[in-house]
Every structure is written in C-alpha cells, then in structure tokens.
Amino acid sequence: MKYRFLFAAFAFFLPLVAGAEDAASCPDAGRAPFMTNVYGRDYTLLNGKWNAIVDLYDQGRKMKVYENRTAKSGEEFYEYSFEGGLRLNVPGDWNSQTPELKYYEGTVWYARHFNAAPADGRRQFLYFGAVSYRCRVYLNGEQIAAHEGGFTPFQVEVTDRLKTGDNFVVVEVNNRRTVDAIPALAFDWWNYGGITRDVMLVSTPETFVEDYFIRLDNNSPDVINASVTLSDAVSAAVRIEIPELKVSQELMTDASGRASASFKVKRLQRWSPDTPKLYDVLVTSAQDTVREQIGFRNISVDGTQILVNGRPTFMRSISFHEEIPQRRGRAFSQADAVMLLSEAQALGVNMVRLAHYPQNEYTVRLAEKMGIILWQEIPIWQGIDFEDDGTRAKAQGMLREMIYRDRNRCAVGFWGVANETKPSDARNAFLTSLLETGKAIDTSRLYVAAFDLAYFDEESRHFEMHDDFTKKLDVVAVNKYMGWYHPWPVDPTEAVWDVAQDQPLIISEFGGEALYGQSGDRRMASSWSEDYQEQLYLDNLEMFRHIPNLAGVSPWVLFDFRSPYRFHPTNQEDWNRKGLVSDQGYRKKAWYIMHDYYQSIKSSGR
C-alpha cells in the first residue's frame, strides 16, 4: 500500500527527468501528484541552514557525495565534505546569499540532518514547495525522487526509509538553462537556483484524505460540487462539513478511493473582491481530518464581459515577479507575500497576474483573504520547443501541478497557458493539449493566454491581431508596449482596436522603463525618466478608452526586477526598470497615474 503511493509519485516525477512515457498515460495519472493542502496537515518544517557544496563540473554524483562518507582509516580520504563549508538558507535562492553565486548556473548540493520517529500506523512524506529547477533527492544515501520544474511542489513517501533518530537528506539542485526546459534558454527574469520554498516532513494516517476539490457549481449559486480522493483504493465513508452553512455531507468512496457529490446550501455568501468571505471546511475520513478555508464564487464570460458572481467586473490588475527587490532574491515567506500584495492593494487592484509562473502558496492564500483575483500561469514564455513531445509532457505536468495545488483557492480566476508565443501548427497543437489537460482537472476557471501579436494595419488604420488559437480561449490577452517598443502610429485618441471583438480583451502588459528619481523630456524614451514613463501611461490610458471589448488592464510591472536581459550600464544594471515601484521601494510618478485610474473605475462601479 505504501509502495503504491511512492510509485504514483514517481510516475509524475520521472517522466520529467528521464524522458519516460507521458504521465497522462500512466494508470494512476488521474490522481493528484501530491496531497492537497499540505499546510492543513501534521508536519515539521525542515527549513533553516543547510550545508551546501557548489559542484561547478557536476562531479558530485560520480563521487557519491550523497552518501556523506568520512574516512574510517588512515588510508582513506574523500575530496568533499558537507561540514565546515558553505551554508545556505532554506527556503531561499543561492544567487542572493553570497556574491560568488550571483550569476551561478549549475549544480549545488544541499544537505542536512533531521530526527525522525517512525510510528506504527503513520506514514511519512518529504514535501518540497519548490526546487529550482531540476533536482534529485537522496535519503540516507539512496536516491528517492527526482523532479523538474522550479515553481510547483512535489512529494515522496519515506515511511519505510526513515531511521529512528538521525536521518540525512541531500538534494542535488541544478538551475542550468536548456533548450528543452520550461522556461527555455532565455527569459526576462533572474534564473534563481536553490530550494526556494518550504521543505516539510509530513505525517499522515495509514489511509488519509489525499485530495479534495470543493467549489461552487459553475451555473448555480446555491449548489456546491465536491470530490474527495483517499490515499488508497478503498471503499469508505468520508464527510464534508461546513459548520457555518450547517453542511454535513457524507460520501462513500468507490473501489478506487474516490467519491463525489453535489448538494444545495442556503444563505451562502459568495466570495468577491469586495467581500472575500471564506468558510471553515473539514474533510474527514475514518482516520484523518483535514481543515481548510474555502471561498465560493462564480466567474464566467458573457460576450465581451467578465462576470464575477454574475456581475460585470473590470479587471484592475498588476503583475509582479516572485522577488523582493530590496533583498534581490526570491520571495518565499508569509512576510514576503504581505509586502508584495500590500503594495498591489494600495495601487487599487482587484486582480494580480502572477508572472510568469506559479508563485508561493503563501501569496495565493493571502490574496484570497485580501479579496484579490489571481491569474496564474506556467512559464511557457517565448523560445519553447513546441515540436518536442518531451517538452509538451513537461508543460502538461507543470499545469497539472499548478492546478492541483490551487484549485480550491477561489481567488484564482484564470489559468494561463502561454505568454508571447508565435502561431504555428506545432504551437497550436501544444497549447491545445494544455487546454485539454487543464479542463480535464478544472472547469471552474477561465483559461487565458497573453499574445504580443497585435499590430497597426496601415490600410485599415486599426490595431489588429490574427491568431485563430484565440477562439479556443475564454479570455484573450495582449501585451502591447505602445510608446516603448512600438512608436505611436496615430495619436492615442485615434487608436482604434479591432482585436478579438467578440471576446473579453485584457491588455495584459504595457508600460516602459524609468530609473527612479530621473528627470527628463517626457517625449523622449531615451531619457529613461519618470517623466517619460508618466506620459507613456497617460497616452496608453487614453488609448484604452477606445477599445470596445476591453475587460481589464495589467501594467507591466509593479516592482523593478532583476534581469540579465537588461545591461544598460547606467539606467538598468541588470534590472528591468518597468516597475511602478523602484527596487528600493519608492513609487514612481506612473504609480499615481494608475492609482487614480483604478480609483475612477472603481467609483464608476465597474
């Protein structure tokens, strides 16, 4: 029974590492790749200082450093040691923790001791919130797991591998960019490497509540749809309780350990940005109880409008990277989530686009409490090899992992499948497979992709975009940097858009770079000035007033962020300066333009 779950876990990990068969073809691929709501479980954090070895030439596996051998006689010696050397914070990236590793891309070995006390009738799992980008996990000298993908969780069962007392875990981490990776060889953000999110030792009963999905019916505001999966293929009773709604619903799992039901509720208050109501929920089996907070809402499309609980809602959005600019490192904690989301909320948003990858669960859960709708996406960001079957399987795996982790989070309104891709038959087939993968798991969100294909047609004198794939999406999004990468072909007051006319359109990126505190000609992009950025925003907002199917806007970006793409020696210095807020936390002039714009939209009731 225990080994069955271990095999299921590897069915998701190994295809990503070894190019084995697509996980979708595995017999147990319908199961969640990890337990739902790990923070609602019995766990011990393994965070803190880990010993580390930098392995520039990838010799560690050959030397079997994961065995942590020491000399037992005068004739023995080993050319490595975890003790007495580099120590790194976990969670955290290595690039921001020591100057020598600022630009490092390669292998780092992490290791630590921890105590364990195996108990009869209990199972134990090592759970990693994220490791960037590839990793292998070794416990007490043996490899037990492998995973590829820097922004989603994975777990492995260690029940029968733990020793009473001292245990030694080693994680081989590699963030080297490759053509078949996601993202691929080049991307406009920092390639942070390391164990970047929480590491946990999770304890569960022998048979536990592995997964559940509890949400409001897409069409009925008083019907809740629920499904529960136990860790083992057994027929047993499970119960869903929502005390405030006086719900106590018993379900019986089938022979595969799954159960589902729909039930009506009375006087349910739906979650919205204005009233982010969450309900305490308990999911109970004979041996296990998982506590959760869940909100219930509807999100849909009607013509060119996005509806939240049936009400047309304009998406007042912003994007940010999972980075604390003042620390020049990955965001990973509850405090980091507060910092990022508080600045977004101050801007006046009702939505955040988490760019360009699934971000920390702390951020997702806090956004839900703050009433912020989320657009989450996987890093299909330019340069992807759409013709490679292995790359497609990786993307499908990443999408599954993102959705399974957060599909109970009602704040997530959009699943994004791509950003700035070019039309081709291979691309269309690749993205179609992602839509099919996502909708097989969750149809309670809107599916979206962002494109940079809108252009000004001299003959029609309109902005147009021709990409048939957009018809498969619920919402179409366009990145368009008018006044920065694209000079204005007409005055903003005369900019007519004819893009996805019968669908909701979000301007998902716009803006330009400005060095905080720099003054200059507001009509010269080369001034890199706050004045130019301010005028650029005013011009774009004027253009937006003439887009008939506009359903939201999302400037790029909230904070300046680190990027090796950007090497102007005085104005960038490895920073993308498009932020409305500087890397030191100061608001630029354009921040106030967007704040006032969002306040005017909110006041109008949109």
Image (cartoon, rainbow, N blue to C red):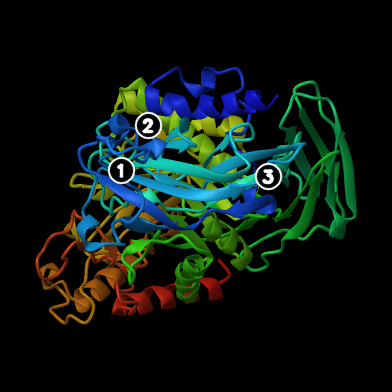
* CA distance separating discs 3 and 2: 48 Å
Give amino acid for label 1: Asn
Q: Which mark is residue 468?
A: 2
Q: Which residue is mark 1?
A: 175
Give amino acid for label 3: Ser
Q: Which residue is mark 3?
A: 203
| Picture residue at 22% right of the left edge, 64% below the top | 491
**Picture coordinates of residue 175 (x, y %)?**
30, 43
Chain-order first, disc 1 or disc 3:
1
Give amino acid for label 2: Asp
| Picture residue at 39% right of the left edge, 40% below the top | 68
Corner quadrant of residue 36: top right
Q: Select label 3 or label 2 by which is in front.
A: 3
Do the CB atoms of the residues marked 1 and 3 lie less than 8 Å apart? no
Nearer to us in this view, 222 or 58 = 58
Q: Select label 2 or label 1 by which is in front.
A: 1
Q: Measured along the vertical axis of the image, is residue 109 above or below residue 50?
A: above
Corner quadrant of residue 593: bottom left
| Picture residue at 38% right of the left edge, 21% below the top | 19
Nearer to us in this view, 335 or 68 = 68
**Picture coordinates of residue 555 (x, y %)?**
36, 62
| Picture residue at 54% right of the left edge, 50% below the top | 114
Left or right, residue 263 beside residue 25: right
* CA distance separating discs 2 and 1: 35 Å
